[in-house]
Image (cartoon, rainbow, N blue to C red):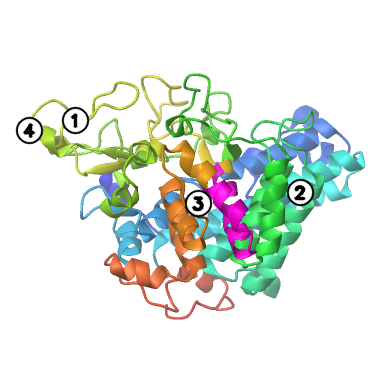
Amino acid sequence: MKNNIIKTLAITAIPIAGLLAGCSKNFLEVDPQGQTTEVLALTDPDAANKLVGGVYSTLYYGGFDKTTVGFLWVLANDIASDDADKGSTPGDFGAAGEIDNFTHTSNNFIFNNIWSGHFSAIISANKAIDVLNKGSLEQSVKNRLIGEARFLRGLYYFNLVRFFGGVPKITTAPLASEGSSDALQTRATAAEIYALIIEDLQFAADNLPLKGDAASQVGRATKGAAQSYLAKVYLYQKNWQKAFELSQAVITSGRYSLVPDYNAIFREKPVNGVGGNNNSESIFEVQTGVNLGENAVSPLFSNGQGPRGRGGWNDLGFGFNTPTIDLANAYETGDTRRNATIIFINPTVAGNSTGTVLWDGFRLPSKDSVENERYNYKAYHSNIAESAQVSNNKDTKPKNIRLMRYAELLLIYAEAAAMTNNAGEATAKLNLVRSRSNLPPSVGTQANIWKERRTELGMEQDRFLDLVRQGRAGAVLRAHGKAFVDGKHEVFPIPQAQIDLSAGRLKQNPGY
C-alpha cells in the first residue's frame, strides 16, 4: 500500500444490477461433487449453514473497493464526529479530509464504496433467504438460518438509513436483467427502510438461539444480538418503551456481563482470565483470525489506524483516524477508559529514544518520529503478543471488530428507562457502567447518559450518528470547528456514480 495509491484511487462505481449478476461467487459458491451450495442448501442443513456462513463473509468488506463495517466505514463515521481527526499527514487522503471538514461532495469515493459494499452484502443475504425459503429443511432450522441472514440484512440497512437516509429497498434476489427496475433504482423513504429493519430484526429475535445455547455458534447472530440492535433502532425512533423492553430482555437473559477490566475488552486473548475475543460482554463482533483465511480479515482496520512514522509507511500503520484532544478531555479524572481508548505519544519524550510503551511492551518511537499525538488503542493489534497476519499482505491483521457490547446495551436501557420515568433503573445501569471504569456514582438523566455513551464508546463509530440522533450534531460539531450545515449534513450524499447509473432515478439528498 503506497501513499500515491490512496491519493489516486478512482471511484469504483458498482451498479446494483451488476451486483445481482454475481456478487457472491467467492464466498457463497462451493462446488462439492459438481453441485453448488445453493442447490444442496435446499435439503442439506450443513450446506444451508455454509450458505449463510457466506453471508457473514460480507462483514469483512473493508478495503478500497467496497466497505461494510471495515476501514472506510470506521474512518467516515469517526472523523465526521468530534472524536477523531483524519490523522496521518495533512495533505494525505483528501477524500477523508473532506469528510473531516464537511466539505465533501457526492463524488467522494468513500460514499460509493460504502454504498456498494452494503448493497452487495444485502443482495448476498437476499440470495440466501430466497434459497432457504424454497428449501425443505426442518422448520426450526430453516427459521434459524433465515433469521441469521435477516439479522445481517437488518444491520446493513440500519447502517445505510442512518448514513444516507432513504435508500432502495431490496428484499429479493432478482435476476440481473431486473436491475433497472424502479424498485431497485429509486429510493424508499427512511420510514419504509426502518419498517424493514424492524421486521428483519424481530424475525431474528423470534428465531435465533440465546448466546451459549446448543444451537448457537460463536460469531453468529443470537437472540440477544437481534434484541440489542432492535432496541437501538427503537432508540433512534424515540420509541422508549420498546427500547426499554428489548434491552431489559437482554439483561434478564443472564447471558452477558461486563468485562471487569476495560483494557481487556479489545485484546485478542483474555487478560488474567477476562476479556479477549468473544468475551462475556460481546453481543456481536466480526470474527477474524488464522482459521478464517485472508478473506475473513478486514483490510486496513488495524494498520490503517496505527501510528505512522515520519518519512513514509512503516510496519506500525498508516496513521488515520486519530483521537481528538476534545475526546481526551471528555474523560473524567481517574476514568480508566481514557488510556484504554487513546494511545498518547508523550510530548516529554520528544528528541530521545524513550517512546510510549504499549500494553505488550512494544515501545513506540518518540514524538519526533511519528506524525500524530494520539492513536486509536482499540484498533491496536500486537505483532508481539497476538496472532500473526494471515497472509503476506501486512495490511491484514486478525483484529475482531466489536459492533455491539453489553455496556452499550446497558446504556440503551438506561436512556430508555430515563425517558419512561424509571429514574431508579436509569441510575442503576448508568452506574454499573461507570463503576467498571473507577468512577463515582452519577444520576441517570438523559444528558448524563449521553455523556457516558461518548466516553464508553469512544472510537467505536457511534458518536457522529449518536449526535444526529440526539438532534445536536450541528451545535456540537460547529463548536468543534467543523462546517456542519443543519438540514444537510445529518446524512451523507447519495453517491453521484449511483445516481448516474440509475439514469437519474435516484434523487440526491437536500443541499448536495
The numbered disc on residue 351 is 4
Q: Is residue 35 visible?
A: no
Structural distance between the alpha carbons of marks 1 and 3: 33 Å
Q: Nearer the viewer, mark 2 or mark 3?
A: 2
The answer to which quarter of the image holds residue 284 is top right
Q: Which residue is mark 1?
A: 365
Magenta stretch?
407-430
Q: Is residue 416 magenta?
A: yes
Q: Is residue 375 magenta?
A: no
> Counting other residues with Cα less than 10 Å from the Cα at mark 1, is it few (<14), some (14-19), or many (20 or more)?
many
Evaluate if marks 1 and 3 touch, with contact meaning CB atoms under 8 Å apart. Answer: no
Structural distance between the alpha carbons of marks 4 and 3: 41 Å
Left-right relation of 410 to 466 = right
What amino acid type should be assigned to the residue bearing mark 1? Answer: Pro
> Counting other residues with Cα less than 10 Å from the Cα at mark 4, is it few (<14), some (14-19), or many (20 or more)?
few
The answer to which quarter of the image holds residue 185 is bottom right
